[in-house]
Amino acid sequence: MSVVPAILQGEARRRFLQGIAFGAVATIAIGFLWGGWITGDTARAMSANAERCGRMSILVPMCVAQFKAADGAVSKFKASSSYSRESTIKEFVKTVASESMDYSLAAASAAGVEAELARAERRAERLFAKPGVQRNE
């Protein structure tokens, strides 16, 4: 005859099983809320986002270099409004490293071209600044 422990008899058994259930629910809730646990869909979305960001970090500098090398591209970029700069980029650069140009790549490249032009302008100001003249910034 097997002896059942006191914890698994009568009212104690019910309380024991309730404790197990409550502990499991609390562990899951704390794990997802504070522990950093994620579901499979969230992990896939994070992976896709990391892949896209990694691809952009490689393609944007290449696109900016291709754009700046095109004849008349920079002058047309400067003349275009801020809302049409992506289409200006798409006009001069069709593909970058066998990737076709899409809106997100064009927008990131437009921001890169703007930053590059601003850097070049600051360099030119420093290069041609008159000695002894203080600039107001």
Image: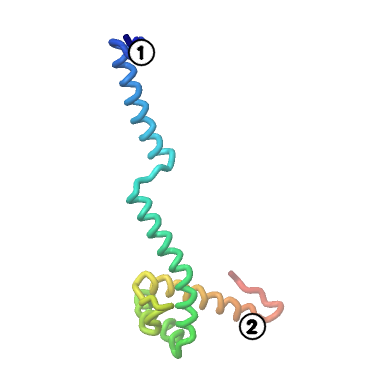
Three-letter amino acid code of the residue under disc 1: Ile
58, 67: nearer the viewer: 58
Residue 75 x/y as whole percent: 45, 86
Tell me if I can see residue 88 in this picture.
no
Q: Which mark is residue 130?
A: none
> Quick check: 91 left or right of 111?
left
Judge whether 7 appears above or below 52 on screen: above
Where is residue 83, by image quadrant?
A: bottom left
31, 88: nearer the viewer: 31
Outermost residue, bottom direction?
71
Residue 108 x/y as whole percent: 42, 70
User: What's the CA distance linking mark 1 and mark 2?
Assistant: 87 Å
> Which residue corresponds to mark 2?
128
> Which residue corresponds to mark 1?
7
**What residue appears at the point 49 percent right and 86 percent down from the top-left corner?**
69
The secondary structure type at the circle numbered 2 is: loop
- 1 vs 2, front mark: 1
90, 36: nearer the viewer: 36
* First in sequence: mark 1 vs mark 2: 1
Residue 50 x/y as whole percent: 43, 59
The secondary structure type at the circle numbered 1 is: helix
